[in-house]
């Protein structure tokens, strides 16, 4: 994934991964590979890849990495990909540091949250889920009241 930033530095990419690992949002066996590339948009850019270096556990749904050259990885290359959620928590951490960075398809923090449907907001996500459930209960109760009114009207 390509990352363009005016604020981030290569060490910051690794530090962000360390922070999300310490919070348990990314498995401790996930590691990062970066290659510095040029950027016309920002001061610095990298091509980054997250890999899972742990043992394959039956049923964990990890898949082989896609090398971008010839399909699934094999041989001496890392063979397991990081989960999409692990990528998401890491990207969110990067965008918290530089909210206007371009990380893959996301042009800033706002677009990241909008396109991921606010999935990577830890505390706010629980509050939003509770609010959504309350709104859904209210809507169900309103429809139940509507059905009762229609039933009374039809029986009269």
Image (spheres, rainbow, N blue to C red):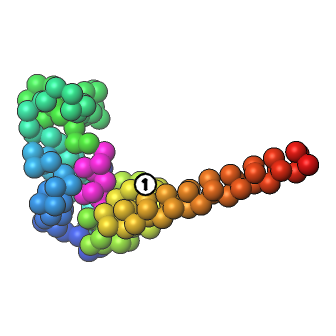
Q: Nearer the viewer, residue 130 or 57?
A: 130
Badge 1 local density, few (<14 within 10 Å), some, or many (20+)?
few
* Lateral position of residue 133 relative to residue 38, left or right: right
Q: Nearer the viewer, residue 72 or 146?
A: 146
Q: Nearer the viewer, residue 78 or 24?
A: 24
Say which quarter of the image contains residue 37: bottom left
18 falls in the magenta region: no
Q: Residue at x 68, y 52 (%)?
A: 144
* Lateral position of residue 33 relative to residue 112, left or right: left
Q: Residue at x 22, y 38 (%)?
A: 81
Q: Residue at x 56, y 56 (%)?
A: 136
- Magenta segment main secondary structure: helix
Residue on which disc 1 sits: 116
Q: Which residues are magenta?
A: 84-92
Q: In this rendering, does residue 40 appear at all? A: no
Q: Position of residue 63 (x, y in %)?
A: 24, 31
Q: Residue at x 43, y 62 (%)?
A: 130
Q: Nearer the viewer, residue 19 or 147?
A: 147
Say which quarter of the image contains residue 3: bottom left
- Up-down relation of residue 50 to residue 40 (above or below): above
* Lateral position of residue 152 relative to residue 20, left or right: right
Q: In this rendering, does residue 145 appear at all? A: yes
């Amino acid at each position: 994934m390509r990352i363009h930033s005016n604020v981030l530095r290569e060490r910051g990419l690794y530090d962000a991964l360390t922070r999300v690992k310490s919070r348990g949002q990314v498995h401790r066996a996930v590691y990062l590979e970066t290659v510095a590339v040029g950027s016309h948009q920002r001061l610095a850019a990298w091509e980054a890849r997250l890999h899972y270096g742990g043992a394959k556990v039956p049923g964990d749904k990890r898949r082989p990495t896609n090398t971008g050259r010839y399909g699934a990885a094999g041989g001496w290359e890392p063979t397991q990909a990081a989960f999409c959620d692990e990528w998401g928590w890491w990207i969110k951490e990067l965008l918290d540091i530089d909210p206007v960075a371009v990380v893959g398809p996301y042009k800033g923090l706002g677009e990241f949250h909008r396109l991921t449907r606010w999935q990577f907001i830890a505390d706010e996500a629980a509050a939003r889920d509770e609010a959504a459930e309350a709104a859904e209960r209210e809507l169900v109760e309103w429809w139940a009241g509507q059905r009762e009114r229609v039933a009374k009207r039809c029986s009269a």
